[in-house]
Image (cartoon, helix red, strand yellow):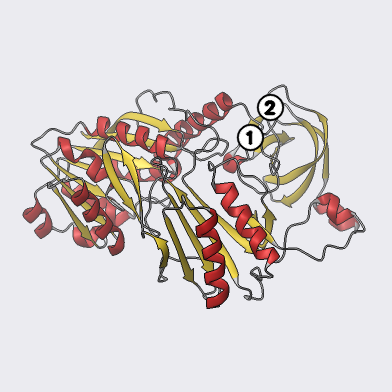
């Protein structure tokens, strides 16, 4: 027992001095950095170390001696438990300051390239109810609060519908009210849970891989349309139809009510057949007069309002003239490609996922855009010499890769294509900086614009313009 205490010490009355990565804060104890959860700069706390490494500790607060003057009261009753919205205790203007600093630090330290002055981050007008997509998990193993675990009560009903506890795949915190998605999102979730409890429907057991109800996805659009996707672990026609009929009748405003039977070991449904129960199999999002069709597997930025700001920055940075050819790599469902098409001679979209490319083509068709072409495949294979000769050399390349950034082969492909300008949109400024370092051979960074898509989290989008040297 003594060895355990020695290996994981209790640090007393330490002052939190700064914000660190992944929503954590930090302080220094002698020559070590200590990363601490659920605190803000200015807090004075006792920290229980949970992870000890040679140069740093990780820990969590067990007692507050003084609360920071920076602190604000979190609006969510689940703050600190569900793992989302970790920065709710920080004023929003401070959140933006730390996000901008992270972008600049990553581009400077990892990119190691000459940078212009970074433009002030574009904050979100909405700091709650800003998401258009939420995913919830059913579980028969609800996470118990500290008070519940320390009580003598016996909890026979552990059913929950909510979010995963960070670092614990089989534990779900039951959500009463989430402040991320506007109504009727909360009402739909609570009604489904209440119906399931009343009718004895089994909630999923993540360890044993058994149970009936598995996940719930709710998507909304700025047009007021709603998509609900219920995932079941196995088929039970009578139970399924009764539940879905209840949801349809109670919430007639639902545009698209769908379900999927997923008996795999993981929750992903992109490889599953999704069935329509009522309504249509898609909803529409609107942006600057353009309509975008969103199916159950479609990717669309989860903050619709800020997506518009992000894409306006992208279009401005691209500076497209009507005689120029634009390549939109990682085009997804063609949102950016269609958004910039009206100012270009031609836009070529390339995406690895074939289903997304089909959606991109549909989005061009419904908006009567006839100067786009979309291709499915690996970037480095599609963008070969013959392709460039056939479709035309790009004047501008726009890239919006996943968090992992671009593969080195894709960077080389871009260098070979030699556009005049590259607009790099990223949700991870660290991998963006790494890729910019590789592009520095022939391009210089001329503009940097962070955009906050996710208030109360540490995540930040960033747009960079690179021009040929």
Give the structural element (helix, strand or loop) at label 2: loop
Name the residue beneath numbered marker 1: 88
Q: Which of 61 and 442 lies nearest the eye of the viewer?
A: 61
Residue at point 32%, 54% (across, down): 408
Residue drawn at 39 percent across, 24 percent down: 119
Q: Outermost residue, right direction?
A: 152
Horizontal and vertical percent for residue 456? 58, 36
Q: CA distance from mark 1 to mark 2?
A: 8 Å
Specify whether residue 112 is in view. Answer: no
Which of marks 2 and 1 precedes in the sequence? Answer: 2
Relative side of 362 to 447, left or right: left
| Number of residues whose C-alpha sits closer than 10 Å to that of mark 2, classed few (under 14), some (14–19) or many (20 or more) | some
Indicate whether 245 appears above or below 45.
below
Q: In the picture, residue 430 is in which quadrant?
A: top left
Number of marks present in the image shown: 2
Does residue 387 appear in this view?
Answer: yes
Which residue is under mark 2?
72
On screen, residue 66 versus residue 373, left or right, reads right
**Residue 42 relative to residue 308: left or right:** right
Residue 407: x %, y % from top left: 34, 55
Q: Secondary structure at mark 1?
A: loop
- Return the residue nearer the eye: 69 or 257: 257
Quadrant for the C terminus in the image: top left
């Amino acid at each position: 027992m003594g060895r355990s205490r020695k290996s994981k010490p209790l640090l007393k009355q330490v002052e939190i001095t700064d914000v660190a990565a992944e929503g954590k804060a930090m302080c220094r104890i002698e020559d070590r950095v200590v990363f601490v959860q659920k605190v803000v700069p200015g807090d004075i706390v006792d920290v229980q170390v949970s992870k000890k490494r040679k140069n740093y500790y990780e820990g969590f607060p067990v007692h507050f001696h003084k609360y920071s003057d920076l602190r604000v009261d979190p609006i969510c009753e689940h703050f600190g438990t569900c793992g989302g919205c970790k920065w709710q205790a920080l004023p929003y203007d401070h959140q933006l300051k730390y996000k901008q600093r992270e972008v600049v630090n990553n581009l400077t330290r990892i990119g190691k390239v000459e940078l212009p002055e970074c433009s002030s981050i574009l904050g979100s007008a909405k700091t709650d109810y800003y998401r258009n997509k939420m995913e919830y998990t059913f579980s028969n193993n609800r996470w118990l609060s500290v008070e519940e675990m320390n009580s003598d009560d016996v909890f026979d009903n552990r059913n929950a519908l909510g979010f995963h506890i960070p670092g614990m795949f089989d534990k779900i915190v039951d959500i009463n009210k989430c402040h991320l998605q506007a109504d009727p999102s909360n009402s739909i979730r609570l009604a489904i849970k209440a119906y399931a409890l009343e009718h004895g429907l089994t909630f999923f057991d993540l360890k044993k891989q058994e149970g009936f109800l598995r996940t719930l996805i709710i998507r909304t659009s700025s047009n007021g349309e709603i998509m609900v996707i219920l995932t079941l672990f196995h088929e039970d026609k009578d139970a399924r139809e009764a539940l879905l009929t209840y949801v349809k009748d109670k919430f007639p405003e639902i545009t698209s009510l769908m379900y999927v039977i997923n008996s795999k070991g993981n929750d992903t449904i992109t490889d599953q057949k999704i069935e329509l129960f009522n309504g249509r199999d898609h909803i529409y999002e609107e942006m600057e007069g353009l309509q975008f069709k969103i199916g159950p597997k479609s990717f669309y930025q989860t903050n619709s309002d800020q997506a518009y700001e992000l894409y306006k920055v992208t279009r401005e940075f691209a500076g497209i003239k009507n005689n120029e050819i634009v390549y939109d790599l990682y085009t997804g469902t063609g949102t950016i490609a269609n958004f910039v098409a009206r100012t270009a001679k031609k836009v070529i979209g390339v995406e690895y996922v074939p289903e997304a490319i089909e959606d991109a083509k549909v989005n061009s068709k419904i908006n009567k855009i006839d100067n786009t072409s979309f291709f499915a495949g690996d970037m480095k294979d599609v963008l070969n010499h013959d392709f460039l000769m056939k479709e035309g050399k790009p004047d501008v390349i726009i890239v919006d890769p996943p968090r992992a950034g671009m593969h080195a082969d894709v960077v080389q492909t871009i260098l070979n294509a030699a556009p005049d300008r590259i607009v790099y949109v990223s949700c991870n400024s660290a991998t963006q900086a790494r890729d910019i370092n590789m592009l520095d051979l022939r391009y210089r960074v001329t503009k940097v614009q962070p955009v906050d898509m996710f208030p109360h989290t540490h995540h930040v989008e960033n747009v960079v313009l690179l021009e040929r040297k």
